[in-house]
Image: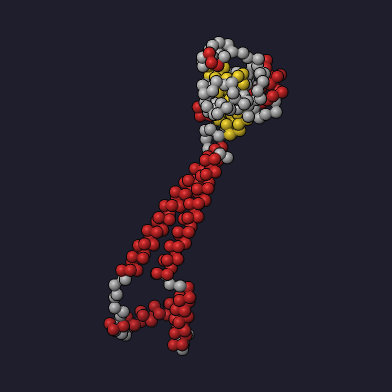
Amino acid sequence: MDVLAILGIIALVVLGAILLFVSSRRRDAGAAISEVSAETRRRDRERVKAGVTSSSTEEAATGKDVERAATLARRDGDLVPLDESEIEPWVAPDPEVIGVARRQFLNRAIIAIFGLNLTGFGLAVIAQLWPGASEGFGSKIKIGPVGDVASSIKSGGGFLYKPEGRMWITEYPAGALEKGRLIYGTTPAWDGIQAGFKALYQKCPHLGCRVPDCGSSQFFECPCHGSFYNQVGEKRGGPAPRGMDYFAMSIENGSLVVDTGNIIGGPSIGTNTTGQEREGPSCLGASSH
């Protein structure tokens, strides 16, 4: 887990705590201004129930009884004119109450927006911490049929770059498998190495610069501090602490699959299973010799 991810999680927790505090304060203020308490509602229900019980001397009529009585009254002309004095006069709503409702709506809208923003931020942090949940780098990438991959490496002068996986794919010589088994035989990359490939992470293990290939020397040469590696990523010089990191590989239905979510630390200094030496001038100049 890198530092940015940790800082992101801390910021998410702090923002969430602030949001909960502000939300609770607003709810308390709203309850004091406009809401009726549960105790008041309970007393109102008891008061209505007591009034009905004390005034009722007969069994309460059902809804059908009321409808039938109203129909008979209309048919027989027994309707009693409405006493207008019994109608409650219309009272305009209190502007302060309307204002409170408006404030409540705005407060809830602001809280909802903050919640959506925090959710999006949280999902972004999770995606950064667990990149394997998405496609591309951090997931398994199908490179292609073994024969096509080998042809692409040859047409690329010994190097095949896959930007979606931030990796170089090179050929691992069959004659080096006996030595290679001692170094890579227990790693999850061995299936791909036996098939004749190695998938190398593009970052230099020294300070993280992107390492390009050099067609003239047939080495990988880091332009930042001069570390260089043979075609299978084994360190041949420079300040790097080890060889280039590489990915787990497998062969599935005749195709090479690279798991970019499984990065393996590069081989130790002095490892040279292929015996490859520089085949031409360096792309970095005389300073790298």
**Residue at the spot x=67%, y=29% of the render?**
187
Residue 158 occupies quadrant: top right
Where's residue 271, x and y in %? Answer: 67, 21
Residue at left offset 70%, top offset 28%:
186
Instruction: Answer with the quarter of the image where residue 104 lies.
Output: bottom left
260 and 54: which is toward the camera:
260
- The scheme the figure's colours follow is secondary structure
Along the line of sight, the residue nearer the viewer: 84 or 18: 18
- Seen from the viewer's position, the closer of residues 217 and 263 is 217
Is residue 189 at all visible to an observer of this figure?
yes
Residue 62 picture location, percent across and down: 45, 79
> Of 47 and 119, which appears nearest the observer?
119
Q: Is residue 147 left or right of residue 59?
A: right
Give the farthest residue toward the top: 280
Residue furthest out toward the bottom: 57
- Indicate the position of residue 260 as horizontal and vertical percent values: 57, 31
Instruction: Classify residue 177 as left or right of residue 97.
Output: right
Rendered-image quadrant of the C terminus: top right
Q: Quadrant of the N terminus?
A: top right
Identify whether 117 is placed above or below 47.
above
Residue at the spot 54% in from the left edge and 23% down from the top edge: 225
Percent across and percent down for residue 19 are 46, 55
Query: Total of numbered circles in the picture?
Result: 0
Residue 167 visible? The answer is: no
Residue drawn at x 50%, y 55% is 17
